[in-house]
Amino acid sequence: MVNNKRKVTTTFIMDAKYYAQVQKLSAERAAALFNAILFYNLTGEVPDFGDDLALEMLFDVMRTDFDANNEKYEQKMEETAAARSAAGTKGAEKRWGKSNNDSKNSKDSKNSKDSKNGYDMTCSDMRCNDITCDDTMSSSSDDYEDIDNSARGRCHREDAEAIVPFGKDMIPSTQEEIRKVEDLAERLCMEYKQKPPNKTDVQKVFDYVHVRTELPNGEAVATFDQQKAALLEYAWEQAAAAEKASWRYIDGIYRNWNGNGIDSLQKLEEHEFKRQHGMSQEAFMQKFYGG
């Protein structure tokens, strides 16, 4: 096997221009070619064709197309990610502003404990600027509601690492982690809903991407999980492709994923491969390549 440095993929484009050449192959050689194509795209390695030089030459020509298409795809993904990041940063700065001059004196929030989420809310560092604990976010509808440019509706302190309650359940988190949630909500809403996020949007993103993390001092806080964020972005891509870009449709996607134990893109790819081929990738490799 010859190593190939390009990224492997579970999807690829096969040009129909090779139909005439493939039709001239016997069924056995055509199957060998197809298996070689799958193997190459799954592993990034060029298979050994033995003495069948004609089949190897045909594969090499097709491989050039695979590599070119994959490179274009990766470049497009990088450009899209960069554009999303720039739009999110610009939108967040425009919406929230960079100055803390309008911040009022903060006050201690009430000590409480959310047994449902397993977070300890007794930390004396939890404070909210310019809001009361009743001014929380609701995820009951997708109705659009403007977020004003003041600090209303957001818990924040100058110290990004300070623990603050967030959202409708007042789950403890930090400004740094909350900012990541807000930026993702900004990118998703601007791209798929063509409008800035409201409090419901931010709350929904938070619900889907946060994980419970225990600090060294024993306190538990909500942190932004990159894998969950990537899965949520993919869900929105699928919703947009179906022309149903709404949280109701996203919730339906997640119900289906949860029923199949899918909580990451890797597990989703494994599930889709098994659904299409009737076996796992590992079983596929063992069946056709003996390991």
Image (spheres, rainbow, N blue to C red):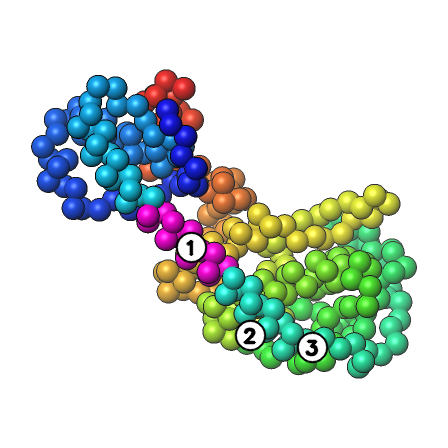
Q: In the rendering, which numbered label is found on residue 12? A: none
- Compared across the picture, whether 73 is left or right of 158 comes to left
- Compared across the picture, whether 179 is left or right of 49 comes to right
Which tag, 1 or 2, sits closer to the chain's start? 1
| Secondary structure state at the residue bearing disc 3 | loop
- The stretch of residues the image draws in magenta is 68-81
Magenta stretch, overall SS = helix
Along the viewing direction, whichever of 197 and 114 lies nearer the viewer: 197
Is residue 99 visible to the viewer in this orientation of the structure?
yes
Asked whether disc 2 touches disc 3, contact meaning CB atoms under 8 Å apart, the reply is: no
Q: Which residue is mark 1?
A: 75
Tell me the residue at 77%/45% (across/down). Answer: 214
Q: Which residue is mark 2?
A: 196
- Compared across the picture, whether 106 is left or right of 90 comes to right
The CA span between labels 1 and 3 is 32 Å
Instruction: Establish if 222 lies above or below 87.
Output: above
- The amino acid at mark 3 is Gly
- Can residue 73 be found in the magenta stretch? yes
Tell me the residue at 61%/54% (across/down). Answer: 209
Q: Which residue is mark 3?
A: 97
Number of other residues with Cα within 10 Å of mark 2, as a class: few under 14, some 14 to 19, many 20 or more: many
| Secondary structure state at the residue bearing disc 1 | helix
Which tag, 1 or 3, sits closer to the chain's start? 1
| x and y, in percent, of residue 51 in the image | 21, 19
Which tag, 2 or 3, sits closer to the chain's start? 3
Number of other residues with Cα within 10 Å of mark 3, as a class: few under 14, some 14 to 19, many 20 or more: few
